[in-house]
Image (cartoon, rainbow, N blue to C red):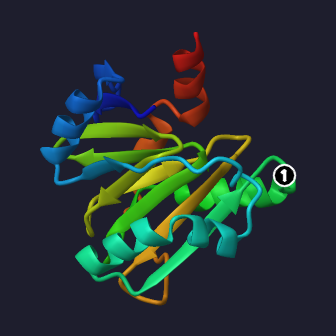
Amino acid sequence: MTYLTVYTDGPAPETLLRTEDQAEIAAALKEIGVRLRHWDIRDGLGDATQDEVLAAYKDEIAAVVAEEGYTFVDVAKLGPDAPADVAAGARAKFLNEHTHDDDEVRFFVAGSGIFYLHVDGRVNAVFCEPGDLLSVPKNTTHWFDMGTNPHFTAIRFFHDDDGWIGDFTGDQISSRIPDYDTIAAGRAA
């Protein structure tokens, strides 16, 4: 189930909101132009190949492509069997604040990750899990944390065949906001 934590973006961030209420999350994200939708979960896809994942969600993917005009769809996957240096390198790549010239649209097939959306003096940390489809508009300042032990499979949508290209801001805000491991541990407590 999706979980949202909203922080101030100052030198000592304060927590403004914590919620699992889906209507409250959707309303908060709508205020910043972000859309959260949910698809039914297909069991048994955690270890599936890209082709198997895309085939399992072909109808939903076709609807999003038709609605939004995406031209490239793929599957990003990282799991517990990934070598430690690969996992750490992937995490480091996305952990710094950046923007894109394209939307960032992800559907979580398995596992989880947090998108941190830095908009209007706040950071909206959206903890995404299986069934969550998050659509972040282009030029939205954000970062992504998959944790120190990444485990996720996500369908990605792009308007350009070049895929993921980040324009990094250089802001170190991601070091001031609680990371994936901290938020996940807080939810489990």
* Quadrant in the picture for the N terminus: top left
Q: Position of residue 187 (x, y in %)?
A: 52, 18
In which quadrant of the rendered image does the C terminus lie? Answer: top right
The residue sitting at the top extreme is: 189
* Quadrant assignment, res 93: bottom right
Image quadrant where residue 12 sits: top left
Looking at this view, is 134 or 9 the one in front? 134
What residue is shown at x 54% (from left), y 58% (from top)? 94
Residue 69 percent coordinates (x, y) = 28, 83
User: Residue 82: image x %, image y %?
Assistant: 83, 56
Q: Which residue is mark 1?
A: 84
Q: Is residue 166 visible?
A: no
> Is 74 placed above or below 17 here?
below
* Amino acid under disc 1: Ala
Instruction: State which quadrant residue 60 falls in.
Output: bottom left
The reply to whether residue 59 is in sight is yes
* Residue 5 in the figure: left or right of residue 84: left
Q: Position of residue 176 (x, y in %)?
A: 44, 34
- Image point (39%, 45%), residue name: 116
Q: Residues within 10 Å of mark 1 (few under 14, many from 20)?
A: few
Numbered circles on residues, count: 1
Please, what secondary structure does the residue beneath circle 1 have? helix
At horizontal 64% and vertical 41% (from top left) the residue drawn is 147
What residue appears at the point 30 percent right and 39 percent down from the top-left corner? 123
- Looking at the image, residue 28 sits to the left or right of residue 61; the answer is left
Towards the viewer: 158 or 182: 158
* Left or right of residue 14: residue 91: right
